[in-house]
Amino acid sequence: MSTAPPLLVVDNLEAGYGQINVLHRLSLTVNQGEIVTIIGANGAGKTTTLMCISGVVKTRAGNITFDGQSITGVPAHSVVRLGLSQSPEGRKIFPRLTVRENLEMGAFTRRDHDGMRADIQKAYTMFPILEKRQSQPGGLLSGGEQQMLAIARALMSRPKLLLLDEPSLGLAPQIVVQIFDVIRELNKQGMSVLLVEQNARMALKVAHRGYVLETGRITFTDKADVLLHDPRIRQAYLGE
Amino acid sequence: MSLRGAAGYWMVAGFVLLAALPFLQGRYIATYGTQLIPVLCFAILALGLNVVVGYTGLLHLGIAAFFGIGAYVTAILTTSGFPFASSFLVAAVAAMLVAAAVGVATTAPTLRLRGDYLALVTMGFGIITVSVIRNLDALTDGTKGLTPVSPNFFPGFDDPVFEKSRPGWKDSWRGYPRLYYLCLAVLAGVVIFLRNLERSRLGRAWVAMREDELAASCMGLNPAKLKLSAIALGAGLAGLAGALFAISQDGTTEPRAYGFERSMLVICCIILGGLGNRPGVLLGVVLLVGYDQIVTSMLDNWLQEQKVNPEGKEYLKVSGWRLFIFGLALILMMRFRPEGMLPAARQKRELHPERDEAAGERAAKAEAEAKDKPVDRGKKNE
């Protein structure tokens, strides 16, 4: 990439719930303009990692630095203002708000109404189906449409880094392809992405680099195409 | 949408009718007109609770405690037993502020509780508050209540004395119908204020947090702040309603009036009418409180006149059956129309999605047939 300092540095992160530690000295970096993916099985700690970065889950030890600024322990609602936006697992759209209202909520931290309107139009260009459904409540969209809405909503705060948690969850293969095309397209426009996925093949195809997470520890990390061809990864995560 | 618009018109028509009421001559107007004043107070109380339960989704079962705090603050600031002798205006503002402060102070430690757990804590808070009022003799005069509450309206001015302009009109602002008009005006002000608030940044943030707290905080909303602001506003409105209620009753009445039963009555009003929807909440108040305050006493008097119940036995009075009738009304409501009589558009969609889905599917099909195919072909050709 470039010589610029990394956008996100996670250093020796520890986190957990109750008496159980989920993450053990986890470190990773995301550089400007990169798609980085974390792959791993159920319960490996992928979502917890993202939740720690976005401030929803409290960290127990370690440091998180974003854009040259420590965000360890900064609450979720403040992290968004620094330019880090999360599309949570399971989409979490507001079911009774309309599609348009969902998008407007995504821009809650902003006050420039003209820019917001322009960004909503941009979202509609990216996902034309959302424009057709703009006055329908979010809860009535199909799973794929909801995922598109969740990504579009996360973009509404104009983040520097987009955190995507399992965007392929529960979607038809065709829709998954579509979603990943959008992720690639966003990255071409300069967006940095940290992508958590169980669908390792799709994730590694779209990402520049990857981390493999096993029971709270990073076990492999390399360029995505290297991981994609690594026999151990192929056996464990790609079903060969 | 059309229903919502219609409800708005009905609401305006209702206000006009209520405003015209004191000018109508009739056997019942003066008698029952006075009893409409508490109904208006309960309407403000219910709108306050609706901010907390309807918009923000925090099930608060102790709203009557804030109502009581408002009434007692007003009484303490204005009755002769205390050295304050404030005007009503000052007392009402103080009642709102104290109620809001108590709301924030008691909610702050419970911010992490959700759903049923929060409901239990707030219920406990309501019950404890009534016990405190009953036992804090030095301040509240125990079960007797503070009386009389008859302050001047403005600070620094003696009350204007009105010439009796019509038969049945009292000459003080606290008499019927001038107090009635004051309550009606305050209620109208609250309705307009809440209408604007619903469309504001804060109003939408409340709704988003009710929908999904995690997603809302990922959008940059601060859940703690939002919850506290909702409770502050709800409790403040309840305090204002309490101040008006104390004036209308010329005292605080007994502490029991601010207990669990009253909280439940207000909860029933907003559920029956339509959670989160102002016209619905007002309709619920008119039906339940109107029934409770006016219709039962009308029926009881009528039964008395008909010599059905000459000894005044409780079980032959309609008022003896009021809680039973509330319960029955709620059960029937939950069975046949769980979204309330005038639901907010959002709730209606959720509980009857088939209507919306059918409409959506029809629209999508029509669109697909009309547009999609040519567009898709166009894309493929590219």
Image: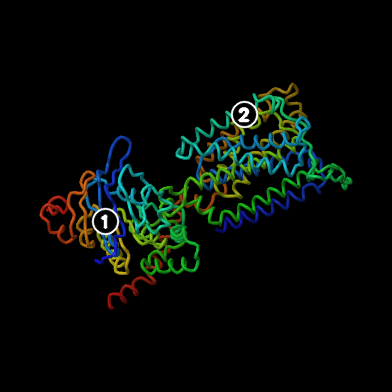
Amino acid found under the numbered disc labelled 2: Val
The type of colouring in the image is rainbow
Determine whether, in the image, residue B286 is placed left or right of residue A216.
right
Mark 2, secondary structure of its residue: helix
Mark 1, secondary structure of its residue: strand
Residue lying furthest right: B163
Amino acid found under the numbered disc labelled 1: Thr
At 20% from the left and 51% from the top, the residue drawn is A212
Q: Real-space Cα distance between discs 1 and 2?
A: 57 Å
Determine whether, in the image, residue A183 is placed left or right of residue B187.
left
Label 2 environment density (alpha carbons within 10 Å; few <14, some 14–19, many ≥20):
many
Label 1 environment density (alpha carbons within 10 Å; few <14, some 14–19, many ≥20):
some
Chain of the residue under label 2: B
At 59% from the left and 37% from the top, the residue drawn is B102
Chain of the residue under label 1: A
Residue A235, given in percent of the width and then of the height, sits at 12, 51
Determine whether, in the image, residue A73 is placed left or right of residue B324.
left
Q: Which residue position holds label 2?
A: B130
Residue B187, given in percent of the width and then of the height, sits at 68, 48
In this view of the protein, can residue B359 be seen by the observer? Answer: no
At 69% from the left and 44% from the top, the residue drawn is B93
In this view of the protein, can residue B193 be seen by the observer? Answer: yes
Residue lying furthest bottom: B382
The image quarter containing residue B315 is top right
Determine whether, in the image, residue B43 is placed left or right of residue A60.
right
Residue A154, given in percent of the width and then of the height, sits at 38, 59
Q: Which residue position holds label 1?
A: A29
